[in-house]
Amino acid sequence: MKTIPAEKLKEYCFRILKAEGVEDSCARDVSDMMLDADLTGVSTHGVSRLSIYVERVRAGVVSRERNVRITQESAATLVIDAGNTFGAAGAKFAMEACIRKAKESGCCFATVHNSNHFGTAAFYSKMAAKEDMIGFICTNVTGKIAPYGSKTAYLGTNPFSIAAPSEGDPFLLDMTPTVVALGKLITAQKLGQSIPLGWALDEEGNPTTDPAAGRRGSLVPIGGAKGSGIAMAIDILAGIMSGAGYGRYLHDLYSMDAPQGLGHFLGVIDISRFIDLTVFKQMVSQYMHEIRNLDKANGFNEIRIPGERGFAELQKNLKEGITIPEPVYEELAELGRQNGLSL
């Protein structure tokens, strides 16, 4: 394991992307997103993804330019073409535009198409919470979930996030409709580790502890049919309504034959149009405080609020640095050597 100061690691990733010909603003958006993931303990979507992003750039299936544009607009809606740039650049552009319009109209919702993997959904919903608004975002991805009752992977892991401000850290939910995110399997495979039973199924629909078999097969949805239903709902919002497509019509992050063609759906709500903002933040804070202080069930020492663990990790990692597994460190170091940079 290697520990690296957060700012040093972020700048290193930015310089690698720049050396690969990625436009400054795109490189910065991607670096910011990856470091936010690592800082908040979501290492599956952090700098461990840099190598695949670079591979896709070299393969010519992701645009190096931040050529994102609004193609249709009303007082409270946006249709955005991401121009096949990095998902982080497209989603950040869309969230910034929604925030601006929500300040004028009270709310704004947007679809994004022609996009790519955007990392952690929480990175974008938090942007709205920082502006004292409620933020929501979801994305579809290639089929990695077998719908309930099937053994064929068809639905995407389709993450979503919602953030709401409080007097302190915001309420922050970021989840996939699966028992674990696909990134957990990818990381386990990189580290040569097995996975717990109940995370994934092999190609025959049997439970497996082999992350490679799980990646070839499917992830297990949460709550059976309920997880499948959530994944389908997000496909409709982020895929069909955006015109991006769904399931078998999207392309995998780890396949270099074509752009991913992913879709996102996001929205921002100006809380002050519904309730006094100070009252809202006080009530959210009180709500979370009351839940934290409920009687603990046997075997539990604390009750966590969604997002709480990540904010604690953030403070720790800003102070102590980000710890990276040796295989990921070697990947990063090799990318640096290829571009005349050192970590």
Image (cartoon, rainbow, N blue to C red):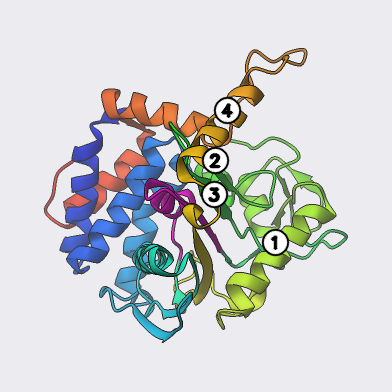
Residue 100 on image: x %, y %: 35, 66
Q: Residue at x 63, y 51 (%)?
A: 176
Decide: is 341 above or below 67. above
Which residue is label 1 attached to?
231
Which residue is label 3 attached to?
275
Q: Amino acid at mark 3?
A: Ile
Number of residue marks: 4
C-alpha separation, residue under disc 1 versus residue under disc 2: 24 Å
Is 133 colored magenta in this rendering? yes
Q: Dot 4 lies on which element? A: helix
Q: Residue at x 65, y 25 (%)?
A: 291
Q: Dot 1 lies on which element? A: helix
The mark that comes first in sequence, 4 or 2, is 2
Q: Amino acid at mark 2?
A: Ala
Q: Residue at x 71, y 66 (%)?
A: 233
Decide: is 109 above or below 38. below
Q: Amino acid at mark 1?
A: Ala
Stretch of the chain drawn in magenta = 117-138
C-alpha separation, residue under disc 1 versus residue under disc 3: 31 Å
C-alpha separation, residue under disc 4 versus residue under disc 2: 39 Å
- Find residue 209 and report its image quarter: top right
Q: Are marks 4 and 2 in contact (CB under 8 Å)?
A: no
Which residue is label 2 attached to?
188
Which residue is label 4 attached to?
286
The mark that comes first in sequence, 1 or 3, is 1
